[in-house]
Image (cartoon, helix red, strand yellow):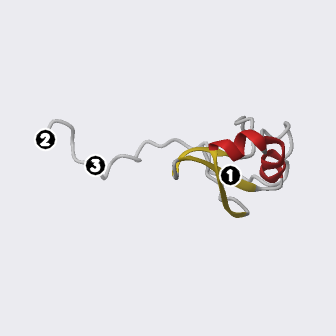
Amino acid sequence: MESSLPLTPALRVNVHEAKTQLSKLLQNVEAGQEVVIARAGVPVARLVPWHDGLPQVAPPGAMAGQIHLHAAFDEPLDDLFTCLPPSGT
């Protein structure tokens, strides 16, 4: 999975503040700011924007004209492995 850096430095809040200001913190996250929630000064959780995790698949034909195969693409590969030593040695 790809990792993306937050647009702004993480905002650190304590658990009490996170509970009382959750709506505001969610607005910050939607704007691209990461929020770190700490208990007794020790980070325990992060609020980050939601990503569905599904890869974005291009529709069929979206790359038409952008992919070109060499004329010999489907030629036999009989001598492809001649540079390797014989098996069993």
Q: Earlier in the sequence, mark 2 or mark 3?
A: 3
Give the structural element (helix, strand or loop) at label 1: strand
Q: Amino acid at mark 2?
A: Thr
Residue 56 percent location from the top left of the image: 77, 40
Residue marked by disc 1: 35
The structure residue drawn at horizontal position 80% and vertical position 55%, both measured from the top left corner, is: 66
The one of 3 and 24 positioned closer to us in this rendering = 24
In which quadrant of the rendered image does the N terminus lie? Answer: top right
Give the structural element (helix, strand or loop) at label 3: loop
The structure residue drawn at horizontal position 70% and vertical position 36%, both measured from the top left corner, is: 53
Residue marked by disc 3: 84
Residue 69 percent location from the top left of the image: 69, 51
Mark 2–mark 3 contact, CB under 8 Å? no
Q: Amino acid at mark 1?
A: Val
The one of 18 and 46 positioned closer to us in this rendering = 18
Total marks in image: 3
Task: Using the image, tell me which numbered label, if any, was put on residue 89.
Answer: 2
Give the structural element (helix, strand or loop) at label 2: loop
Residue 78 percent location from the top left of the image: 43, 42
In the image: residue 4, left or right of residue 51: left
Q: CA distance from mark 2 to mark 3?
A: 11 Å
The one of 56 and 43 positioned closer to us in this rendering = 43
